[in-house]
Structure formats: structure tokens, C-alpha cells
Amino acid sequence: MSQKHSSHPTLLQEFRSFCFQNAASDFEQAVEYFAVFGGMGWRVDFTQSIETLIEEKVLKNYRYIHGDIAHTTKSKPLYHALLTALATGDRREHAAFKKAKATREEGEEAIDWLIKSGLLVFDKSVEKPFKEAEGSSDKLHFVQPFMRFWFACVSPYYKGIKEGDYSEMKAHWEQIKAGFSELIYDGLVLEMLKSAFKEAFAGDPIVGIGGYWDKQTQIDILIKRKSGQMIAGATKYSKAKANKSELAKLKEKCAEAKLDVTAFVFFSKNKFSSELKKEKGESVQLFSLRNLSGLMDDLSQKDLLEHTNKKY
């Protein structure tokens, strides 16, 4: 989400448009529904359960939506296999090649095509690893959240869905539903941090924001400023409070990756332990759902994006 192609709206623009169009009032519900239906300009009724909407809007319209998507992907099995591998895996390019049984050459060619056709964008580690050999492949993001949902939950179960049997798809959705919107949260947290630090960092602005990964280490958030100064961060979505041990873990990861980090940020969906709160200050900043839900503030007609695809 940090590496948006300039011709695509940002995740935040898509999210605000979705919230305005559908008069969203509950932030967590908005994120959950956006993770499934986002990026398409569809009207979504927040009074209905997400399962009802998936069945009514997506499964019952399977043939039509499949036709539209197949038109974009030229119905190429390799493209579909790669898109499903990316939607269900760790989003790393080379892992998707393996899963889709594609050679590196075929895979790279296909990914280039899928980026050009507006389905995917690259997501690169903010900082290159200290040793080149430690580098791990780039990740990819779906431009439209709905496409990720389609290739994770609908496309793999098309045989049953086509016959009107949704049981396999529904069982799969039940399994992954709880964590499905975390990727959207990750992207929105980055957007929130960008705006939270905009004024404070005016003299030394952010030049890179996203994640960090190499073969050994993965860090949720890495912010790089013009001066080279870095801030690392972690996100927590589970029901437990974020605690002080997570700060120690984050410092350890930065040391492993040989990143010279001067400050830390934490986002927790369910509050912070009192020990971690005591660490709060210049070098440790804590952000909660309250900060994040500010991304829905002051929605107006000017937030509405125009979508040209068919509406279901």
C-alpha cells in the first residue's frame, strides 16, 4: 500500500469513498466490509450481515462477475493461479511462482502483465537488507480489495458456486474471515501515521513508509525520513493488549536486521498494558482504534470516486 501506482487511487481514497457512498458509521464494520467489497464502487447495505451480502451480491452473480474478470485476465490459467497464490499466501512474488508452478521467467512476465492491467501493484521492503544475500522477493498488493477476496474465496471454489452449491466456499470463508481484514488495517495504519506525522516531520519528511522484510526478519512498519532517520513499528489485532515485551521484540528485530532505528510506534486494536504505556514518550508512540477511526472523519461528496465497472 506504500507503493501505489500513481494512476490508482490510494487505499485511503478508496476507503473514504466506500464509507461516504455507503454512509458507514462504525469503523470496524466499515473495514470488514471494505476488505470484501472495496474498490468496486458497489453499494453495500451495512444493516445486512457480510455473509448475506456475499451470497446476494457475489455468489448469485458469479457468472457475470466471472465474465467481467475473465475479460480482464484473458482467462489465462497462469494468471488465475498466480492471483489465487497471492490472495491466499504471504504475497511474496517468488512464493506465488512456486505455488502456481510457474518458472521465474513465466511468473515475472505474468506479474508484469497483471500490474499493467491494473490488478496488482508492487509492495517493496522500505529498506534493503544489510547483506544483499539476505534479500527476499518483493510482495504484491491487489489494487482493489474485492479482487483479493475473489481470488482467495470465490475463484478456487468456482465448480460448486457455478452449480449453486456454496458450501465449500462458505466453509473456507468461515476459516479465514477473522483475519481477512488485517491487511486492510495494515494499509490504513500506514495512512494514519503519514497524516499523524505530517506536521511534526515537516522539516524532515517521510520518504518511505511500509514494511521491512528479509529472509529472516519481518517488521510490520518501517518509516524512513529524508535525513535517513528510521522509525519501526508493530501492529496488534488480537484481543490481548499490546505489552512491553512487544517493544523488546521489535528492538530485537531491528538489531537482527541491522537497522538504525531511533523511535518506535505501536498500533493496537485492543489497548495497551500499563507497562507499555509507561514507555510512552518521544521515542515510543502508541496509536489505538480511536486514532485510526479518524480516517473516516469529515466525509463529503468530494470523497466519492467514480468507478466505471459494472455495479452488482
Image (tube, rainbow, N blue to C red):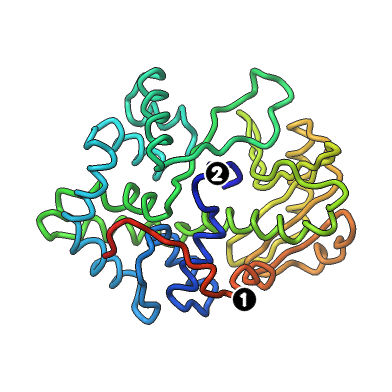
**Residue 185 appears left or right of 131:** left
Which residue is labeled 1 in the image?
Answer: 298
Task: State which quadrant residue 228 falls in.
Answer: top right
- Answer yes or no: do the residues labelled 2 and 1 have beta carbons within 8 Å? no
Task: State which quadrant residue 210 falls in.
Answer: top right
Q: Amino acid at mark 2?
A: Ser
SS at mark 2 in the image: loop
Give the residue at the far left of this rendering.
163
SS at mark 1 in the image: loop
Q: Residues within 10 Å of mark 2 (few under 14, many from 20)?
A: few
User: Sequence-wise, which precedes: disc 2 or disc 1?
Assistant: 2
Q: Amino acid at mark 1?
A: Asp
Q: Is residue 290 above or below residue 40?
A: below
Q: Is residue 254 above or below residue 234?
A: above
Position of the C terminus by quadrant: bottom left
Label placed on residue 6: 2
